[in-house]
Amino acid sequence: MSPGSLRIATGVATLVVLGATAYLAVLGEWSSFLACVACSFAVAVGWVVARHEPASLVGPALAWTTAAIALVTAHDAGPLASLPWSVGIWPVNLAGLLVLMLVFPSGPLPGRWWRAVPAVFALATLGMVVAMWGATEVDGQVVGGPDDRWANLLATAGLAAIAASLVLAAGSLVVKHRRGGQRTRRQIRWLLLATILVVALLVAGWFAEALGASLDVAYSPFLLAIVTLVPTAVGVAMV
């Protein structure tokens, strides 16, 4: 991609965060508003990286790690939350992080298997939407949706595919670390440190939800880690 296209991608992420923040302010959803304000930190660091490395995919990918979160947060906080697909789109929160791990620090690994990871993640996300179609969130708990066996199997398969995609994306960092030079290895150590903690918090959130915790309690630490730890690690590593 050309530097101009990369700047456009970063600019779109910026507009998404700003638009989501303004939308939530109009609705008076102040807790979600503050979450979107926090998302602007990664966007700002993404612009710094983009200026420092204008031909790198890392800047736009970093900006989208939280632009995706802001988009889902705005969707779920307002009247759009009543739409039948709203609960099932939660994997979109992870899309930016997945791409960031695949392209950091100097582009994706060659090979069709690595290129297939985003496609698997997208299909798994679609599967989660179908499996949770019509479900709603009530007092932090997911209720309703299809109650058939196929829905449970599809949700389980989707969850497994999403987890596998994240593990493979993190694995690409390990491969780059082994093949890279001294500077590349130092850069990857920064992101791996943040990524391991983020994935651990996500898994902990899954267990917490299974044990009956509300969605806010289960996943707030994970989202906070993406918003703060990941951009800090990437900013230090790249700049």
Image (spheres, rainbow, N blue to C red):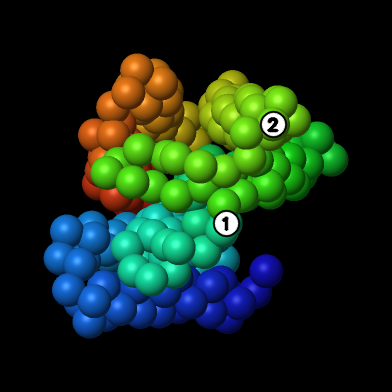
Q: Quadrant of residue 4?
A: bottom right
Name the residue type under label 1: Trp
Q: Name the residue under label 1.
A: 85
Q: Quadrant of residue 157?
A: top right
- Residue 216 point in image, percent of width and height: 26, 41
- Label ID, residue 230: none
SS state under label 1: loop
Residue under the point 30% across and 78% down: 23
Instruction: Give the answer, above or below, for where 78 lies relative to 147.
Output: below
Can residue 57 be seen here? The reply is: yes
Of label 2 and label 1, which has the lower sequence position? 1
Residue under the point 23% across and 60% down: 32
SS state under label 2: loop
- Residue 1 point in image, percent of width and height: 67, 69
- Crowding near the residue tagged with mark 1, few <14, some 14–19, many ≥20 C-alpha atoms within 10 Å: many
Tell which tag, 2 or 1, sits nearer the viewer: 2
Q: Are marks 2 and 1 in contact (CB under 8 Å)?
A: no
- Label ID, residue 148: 2
Foreground residue among 17 and 89: 89
- Residue 105 point in image, percent of width and height: 51, 45
Q: Separation of disc 2 and disc 1 at Cα?
A: 17 Å
Foreground residue among 143 and 188: 143
Name the residue type under label 2: Asp
Can residue 67 be seen here? The reply is: no
Residue that extends furthest to the right in the rendered view of this protein = 112
Residue under the point 61% across and 49% down: 133
- Residue 19 point in image, percent of width and height: 35, 79
